[in-house]
Image: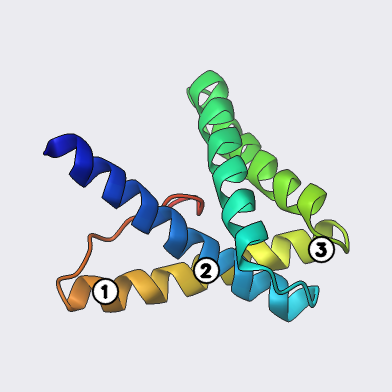
């Protein structure tokens, strides 16, 4: 049963993180494809994890490199450039925090998401 709960938690967290990326991308790049946002969130979270695992031990620099890798995935996946990618990441973070806060207040989920750093 714990495996099923973990899988459900992962999927829900991924969908919430993708919602934030979708919102940021639709505002800044006019790309409105939720499936694309889900794939982006999955890739970005994996890249974040790998970079943080290998470089996260370096004070400050490790976290900055992991964040830069996350933004690089968004930059690669969406049109625009680095400024738009940073904007998408910022909007995604804000949107995800708001969504998770509301869901946590309602007792539906915990305050964490896959695909958005620091949440």
> Residue 12, how many percent across, how many down?
35, 58
Which comes before the other along the chain, label 1 or label 3? Answer: 3
Q: Is residue 113 visible?
A: no
Where is mark 3, residue-wise?
83
Q: How is the image coloured?
A: rainbow
Q: What secondary structure is marked by label 2?
A: helix
In the rendered view, does 65 fall on the left or right side of 82? left
Q: What's the CA distance linking mark 1 and mark 2?
A: 14 Å
Residue designated by label 1 = 103
Q: Residue at x 14, y 37 (%)?
A: 2
Discs 2, 3 touching: Cβ within 8 Å: no
Q: Residues within 10 Å of mark 1 (few under 14, many from 20)?
A: some
**Quarter of the C terminus within the rendering:** bottom left
Q: Which residue is mark 2?
A: 19
Q: CA distance from mark 1 to mark 3?
A: 30 Å
The residue at the point 54 percent across, 68 percent down is 20
Q: Are marks 1 and 2 in contact (CB under 8 Å)?
A: no
Q: Is residue 37 left or right of residue 111?
A: right
Mark toward the start of the polypeptide (2 vs 3) = 2
* Label 2 Cα neighbours within 10 Å, binned few <14 / some 14-19 / many ≥20: many
Q: Earlier in the sequence, mark 1 or mark 2?
A: 2
Q: Residue furthest left?
A: 1
> Badge 3: how crowded within 10 Å, few (<14), some, or many (20+)?
few
């Amino acid at each position: 049963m714990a495996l099923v709960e973990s899988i459900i938690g992962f999927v829900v967290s991924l969908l919430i993180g993708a919602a934030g990326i979708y919102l940021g991308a639709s505002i800044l790049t006019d790309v409105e494809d939720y499936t694309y946002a889900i794939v982006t969130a999955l890739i970005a979270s994996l890249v974040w994890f790998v970079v943080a695992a290998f470089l996260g031990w370096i004070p400050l620099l490790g976290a900055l490199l992991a964040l830069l890798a996350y933004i690089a995935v968004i930059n690669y996946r969406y049109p625009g450039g680095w400024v738009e990618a940073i904007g998408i990441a910022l909007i995604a973070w804000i949107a995800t925090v708001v969504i998770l806060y509301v869901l946590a207040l309602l007792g539906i989920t915990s305050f964490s998401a896959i695909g958005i750093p620091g949440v």
